[in-house]
Amino acid sequence: MMKNFLITLSILFILSGCSSLELEAVSSSEEETNRILALGLSHEENLIEASKLDTPHLVSVVTLQLTNARDEEIQDKIDLIASDEFASMVNISSDGLKFIGSNVSESKKTGILETDIDIQNFHLEGIKNPNNGLINHKLVLSVAHNSRNERQYSSANLCDEWNRCDSNKQEINVVSSSAANCSTSSCDFKEVMELSLSNDFLRKASNTGFKMKFNANRKSNKINVSKSYLMGYLKIAQ
């Protein structure tokens, strides 16, 4: 019995040691990456510094982390430039209390027929309360489609970073639904809806942007509000 206990205890010590080594290796790569980035060198010089590290594995991990950091920095600069353009297109009311972001239009194939296309248009709007300065925002979406019946959108779900949109269900306000060019089998429908969004939510989402799924009886539509669009809108709507 005592022998089995000692064997089990030895195995636990070994496993604990391996776990510590793995954690130490991960921590070491992050520390080395941060150390090299703090030197303020060019990316090529950073890679030279990484090549001087102790083990090939550490060199490989730190090199990857340095490259990812470089790519993120480039993307941040691209987003910043794009956000300035989006900011310039925000329409401000004469009293300075209403903000309307630029319109984003997308077309998405939904079936095999030529008419199986959804035309999506969305923008952000904000109205400032003159008494307390708080801004109420909403996401306005219109969907044009050729179908037998209107879709009757009823709710929306926020999508997570893995593009799962099955939680955080929210009510929407259907603004209008119209039909034109009707035949015996279909009409050209345009359905307009809006979703209220808090200022806190938009500020938090400005680092990544966000995706939203709008739900109808048999269909759903996903829209992607990009980081640069959101950054530009919030530069003005404040």
Image: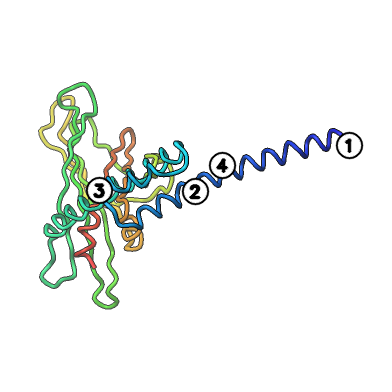
**Residue 27, x across and y down, in percent:** 50, 49
- Quadrant of residue 3 in the image? top right
- Density class for disc 2 (Cα within 10 Å; few <14, some 14-19, many ≥20) is some
- Density class for disc 1 (Cα within 10 Å; few <14, some 14-19, many ≥20) is few
Amino acid, disc 1: Met
Mark 1 or 3 closer to N-term?
1
Q: Secondary structure at mark 2?
A: helix
**Residue 133, x across and y down, in percent:** 27, 74
Foreground tag (1 vs 3) = 1
Q: Secondary structure at mark 4?
A: helix
Residue drawn at the location 39% of the way across and 40% of the way down: 162
Q: Which quarter shows the C terminus? A: bottom left
C-alpha span from label 1 to label 4 = 30 Å
Residue drawn at the location 78% of the way across and 39% of the way down: 9
Label 2, on which residue? 28
Mark 1 or 2 closer to N-term?
1
Residue drawn at the location 73% of the way across and 36% of the way down: 11
83 displayed left or right of 68: left
Q: Secondary structure at mark 1?
A: helix
Amino acid, disc 3: Gln
172 displayed left or right of 181: right
Label 3, on which residue? 75
Q: Secondary structure at mark 3?
A: helix
C-alpha span from label 2 to label 4 = 10 Å
Foreground tag (2 vs 3) = 2
Label 1, on which residue? 2
C-alpha span from label 2 to label 3 = 26 Å
C-alpha span from label 1 to label 2 = 38 Å
Label 4, on which residue? 22
